[in-house]
Amino acid sequence: MLDDMPVLRAAVQAYRAAATAAGVAWPDGGERAGQLPPDVLCRVFDVDHIADQPIWLASQVPPHEPVLPAGAYLLRWTDADELLDYLSFAVAIPFHWRHQVPLFFVDHLVFTFVLTGDREGEIWRYQIDADDWNPVRAAPSLAALFTEWTKGFAANVYDRSPYDDWLHIGHDGRDPFDVLQRQALDPFAFPVHASSYPHGDLVRERQRECGVDVGRADDFESQEALLEAVDAARASLRT
């Protein structure tokens, strides 16, 4: 769902305050030159508008700075081909694969914002992994996502390292999903890997809840078809 802007501003500010109090360096500003304007983003993602919420967020969170849980960072929207490539594992989801903008990234995990339809404003996540992509909704909205992250401070789920100021989860070798579940937090809301092997039942349950076609979610042919669609979309932008 689309958050009211005051609700989203409050949620992001609460997370930033908690993160900086915990020692996370949150630089002001950041390099935003070259960002694609909304009209170009509309063409890239084949929609007629871009909601205010992700545009505003891109002005508040410094790009490519690991200020989010597990070292995740805000992506810059500068390269249309790259943005579409991030959607290459959005298989079997209940809306058009192209109608979402990548927001956050860490390692092989991307979080996106749905741009249109009944699910506009939802946050989805995909693992860019040959065998374990697990498409699933991460949160019903941006405010809900940041609120869940903020709860992680009171639940003491973030580990610190002497080598960086990231908010690690399971840095001591524990399974991050287990760490989050034990504290009654939603593990899918956090940018940590969700393996189908120890957590297959949990993954499938969430997929069914949010409308993923479970029978196709791990289907190689479906993913190949999506890759072809991504290539076609990229080619169409050059015509």
Image (cartoon, helix red, strand yellow):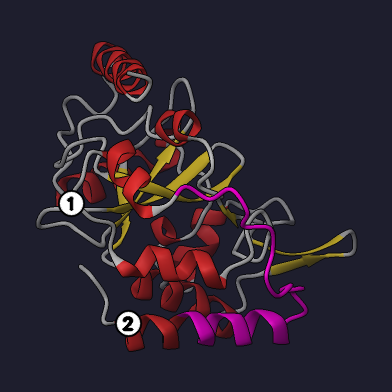
- CA–CA distance between discs 2 and 1? 24 Å
Question: Which residue is identified by label 2?
Answer: 5
Q: Is residue 147 left or right of residue 51?
A: right
- Name which of mark 2 and mark 1 comes first in the sequence: 2
Q: Which quarter shows the C terminus?
A: top left
Q: Residue at x 16, y 46 (%)?
A: 208
> In the rendered structure, does residue 31 fall within the stretch colored magenta?
yes
Circle 2 packing at 10 Å, graded few (<14), some (14-19), many (20+), is: few
Q: Which residues are magenta?
A: 12-36
Q: Is residue 21 left or right of residue 208?
A: right
Kindly give the residue lying farthest to the left in the view shown.
118
Q: Which quarter shows the N terminus?
A: bottom left
* Secondary element type, mark 2: helix
Give the label on residue 210, or none: 1
**At label 1, which amino acid type do we have?**
Cys
Q: In front: 135, or 183?
A: 135
**Percent position (x, y) of residue 230?**
33, 22
